[in-house]
Image: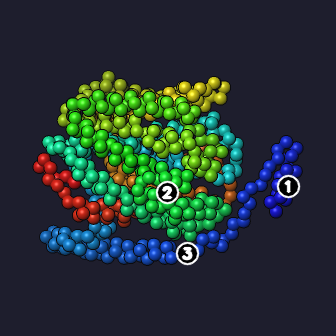
Amino acid sequence: MQQSIRQCYDEKYGKYGIMGEVENLKCENNIPKYHVDSLDVAVAMIFVCYVVLIAFATFYEGTARYKTEEEYKKLTCAGWRRIASAFSIPRNWYRLITVKSTTDIEKLRPIQGVRFYNTILVILSHTVMTFLIGPVANTKYAETLMGKVATLFLSSGPLCVSTFFFMSSFLLIYGIFSQFENKKVKLKDLLGIFINRYIRLTPSVVVVIAFYATWWRHFGSGPHWNDLIGKEFLRCRNNWWINLFYLNNFIERENMCLVQTWYLALDTQYFVFLLVLVWILKKYEKLVWPILCSFFTILIAATFLDNYNEGHEALILPLPEKLYGMKLVLGNTQWYDQMMSWKGNLVGCIIGLAYGYSFYKNKNKSVFEINIANQIIYHIITYVLALGVIIVPGVLIFNSEMDHSIFWASLHVAFGRPIFSFAIGFAIYGAIFGLGWVTKSVMEWPPSYILGRLSYSTYLVHATIILSRVASSRFPTYVSDLHMVYYLFGDVATAFAAGFIMTLLVEMPLSDLQKLMIPMKEINGEKKK
């Protein structure tokens, strides 16, 4: 049959001088390729037990709410009752929507807003990428992507990712310097901070891995289902343990389980490095700025030299042949060097440390005078600088008539992210101290604070939503700008809905148990973790 199909196409297109080869011919039907096995049954049993626990905890804690305050505390605040209450849906709903009003929380509201908007941008980029993972009905659209202005922003995904690393390092240095303001930071304190973070993040990862490695493959079918979901299942069956050590961006990266968690692995590795660096900065506080400037300079030079030696392009171009079958991510050297490795994003962390330390030193001061001149400067840095570093080099890079050199490409790779991180950092920093006008209001939009709390779970599950949609498709996808917008809204809404369920039923109950495992300590007269 394969030979007959090849001859048919050769006869049809031979007059155009096109000859083809048929590969990977197969027939998909409704008969499952993978059958339910013992691991599937074990995970299903654990899931049922967990649902029973949630139901019992919700009923128990819910009925206790009708008691007096004294009786409620007695029924929910000691022994097994306290543990059971952690899984109550009403209790976790209240925790989710309750925003404590403290000086730090009010000042740092822009960060939570930026986290929410950045999560939408991540979903947008993955929605667009998955349009081109499988067969496309109108191939002309895919082939002319390079001519679209929106592609500039899609190719600048590394800049968006660097913002997440910026925020993590900002909060890390501010938290440690504030918590240990009049104390020395000991190595055991650093170990405790890391363990705290590991316990907070890992259970949700385990849940998603368990779903990928068991029941996901049974939840759908289609011509591409086994190519996409089946491969994810096999990768997670074989390499799930690597994710638990957050080394999946190094070990078996071409067969990575939960491809989207390369960011989480890299962020964890940065976190360990930054813990030690912040410890050094705290110990030698007078040398904070020389140390940070030295790291910044070394990273700029190292990034330039690495990209120059490797001969990578300035942007990760969204070419159809790279996107098809997820080839852009798995096994692509440029993607690894500029996104998944230590080389690419560490400079954003250093800039985050600089802004975070500056905020720590000036949080009780009036840094900016709120006047028209400063508002104009703020918006020029935030928008002109940030968008300029995307658009101007992008237009030149996408111009096929220009000669492109590795030198200028490496210069853009070395300086693009630092400039963008500086601009976004200034947007956040300025908004914290009162600048920003409408921009500040958007970042501090009240619902964004709650939605920002859903960002971690949403990030973990959004790829499941998008890939399931693509893998279950029965026909080649028709792609257009309108279709992308339409699917983006659907993917964002569905991902946040799934993230909400994950947060309410998994992330928040287990974070509540974490507080029981790691008691609060009294530091400087305030309760700290």
Residue 176 visible (yes or no): yes
Amino acid carrying mark 2 in the image = Leu
Residue receiving disc 1 = 8
Q: The residue tagged with tag 3: helix, strand or loop? A: loop
Mark-to-mark CA distance, 2 and 1: 40 Å
Looking at the rendering, which quadrant does residue 430 occupy? top left
Looking at the rendering, which quadrant does residue 118 occupy? top left
Residue receiving disc 3 = 36
Q: Nearer the viewer, mark 1 or mark 3?
A: 3
Compared to residue 223, the image places residue 427 above or below, namely above
* Residue found 31% across the figure and 34% down from its top: 354
The spot of residue 259 in percent (x, y) is 51, 53
Label 3 neighbour load within 10 Å: few <14, some 14-19, many 20+:
few
The spot of residue 450 in percent (x, y) is 34, 52
The spot of residue 307 in percent (x, y) is 52, 33
Label 2 neighbour load within 10 Å: few <14, some 14-19, many 20+:
many
Amino acid carrying mark 1 in the image = Cys
Mark linked to residue 258: 2
Mark-to-mark CA distance, 2 and 3: 21 Å
Q: Nearer the viewer, mark 2 or mark 1?
A: 2
Q: Which quadrant, please, contains the C terminus? A: bottom left
* Residue found 63% across the figure and 70% down from its top: 33
Compared to residue 60, the image places residue 193 above or below, namely above
The spot of residue 429 in percent (x, y) is 31, 35
* Residue found 55% across the figure and 48% down from its top: 329
- Viewer-closest of 391 and 348: 348
Residue 483 visible (yes or no): no
Q: Earlier in the sequence, mark 2 or mark 3?
A: 3
